[in-house]
Image: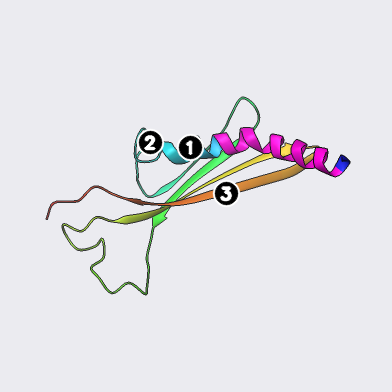
Amino acid sequence: MRTGLASASRSAALEPPLAVAEAKLAAVGVTEPLALGASAGEEKSGIRWRVAIEDYRDDGFDGPSGDVPGVPRLYRVRVTVSWLQGGAPRSLSLDSLRLESARRP
């Protein structure tokens, strides 16, 4: 029984950091620019976050790349959040691929 309660407690402790990570990830390309680089900050709750956006390259892909005019570029977006839980540092990361709007030649 104690194991189940401990698991439930750990799971509940993940909810606020996960919500921050999901919100930051959802904002990229909508309310935050989809542009190469990184940004970071801290919520009032003490949860720190970092958003990193980089070009995504798939060396196994045989088609045109985002470097070709008219072909949209693909980005890898990684959101990492960190916090203290019971005095111990914790972190989690979410990754996503985002396609930029088609560019005109």
The residue tagged 2 is 32
Write the residue at 56% across / 39% down: 49
Classify residue 105 as left or right of residue 97. left
Disc with the residue nearer the chain's start (1 vs 2): 1
Image height of 82 relative to 42, above or below: below
Is 16 covered by the magenta stretch? yes
Number of labels in the image equals 3
| Extreme-front residue of the structure | 1
SS under mark 2: loop
- Secondary structure mainly formed by the magenta segment: helix
Q: Nearer the viewer, residue 36 or 78?
A: 78
Is 75 covered by the magenta stretch? no
Q: Which residues are magenta?
A: 3-19
The residue tagged 1 is 24
Q: Are marks 1 and 2 in contact (CB under 8 Å)?
A: yes
The residue tagged 3 is 93
Q: Dot 3: few (<14), some (14–19), or many (≥20) neighbours within 10 Å?
A: some
Q: Give me the C-alpha separation between circle 1 and circle 2.
A: 9 Å
Amino acid marked by disc 1: Lys
Amino acid marked by disc 3: Ser
Q: Which of the two marks, 2 or 3, is nearer to us in this view?
A: 3
